[in-house]
Image (tube, rainbow, N blue to C red):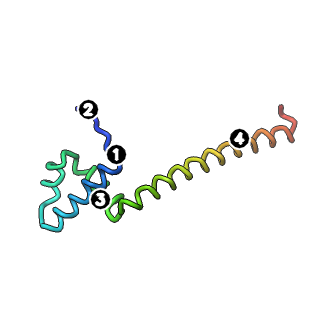
Amino acid sequence: MKRKRHSRSDILVKVRQANAELAAGVPLEEIHQAQQVSLQTLQRWLRDYGGLQPESLSRLTQLEQENRRLRRAVANLEVDKKILSEAVRGNF
């Protein structure tokens, strides 16, 4: 079976529906079958996106992009640091 990727906005819609159905007393097993996702996926989405509001989604995306940029910067600095330390030791 081909794996389907869900966008974050689709995930938020499904999580809101799941929360509403859970509040109405529908078992989680029925919810994940109705939404056509695995039980593990639905549980992970509920854990990660359970209390997230739509306006928080854009902020989360911005923070993840900034985090990626900073990780790349740190990786580049580590390479520069190793090159300079080898140059100081004379191992070039």
Amino acid type of disc 4? Val
Q: Residues within 10 Å of mark 3 (few under 14, many from 20)?
A: some
Q: Which residue is mark 2?
A: 2
Query: In front of the other: label 3 or label 4?
Result: 3
Q: Position of residue 4 (x, y in %)?
A: 28, 38
The answer for how far apart the CA atoms under marks 1 and 4 are is 35 Å
Mark with earlier residue (1, 4): 1
Please report the residue visible at 26 percent of the width from the left and 54 percent of the height from the top.
13
Label 4 SS: helix
The label number, if any, that marks residue 79 in the structure image = 4
Answer whether labels 1 and 3 touch (C-beta < 8 Å).
Answer: no
Depth check: give the residue in front, 17 or 37.
Answer: 17
Q: Nearer the viewer, residue 40 or 23?
A: 23
Residue that label 1 marks: 7
Earlier residue among tags 1 and 3 = 1
Neighbor class of circle 2 (other Cα within 10 Å; few <14, some 14-19, many 20+) is few
Closer to viewer: mark 1 or mark 4: 1
Callout 2: helix, strand or loop? loop
Secondary element under disc 1, as helix, strand or loop, is loop
Q: Position of residue 64 (x, y in %)?
A: 50, 52
The residue indicated by pointer 3 is 46
Amino acid under disc 3: Leu
Determine the CA span between mark 3 and mark 2. Answer: 23 Å
Q: Earlier in the sequence, mark 2 or mark 4?
A: 2
Q: Is residue 23 left or right of residue 72?
A: left
Q: Nearer the viewer, mark 2 or mark 1?
A: 1
Q: Earlier in the sequence, mark 2 or mark 1?
A: 2
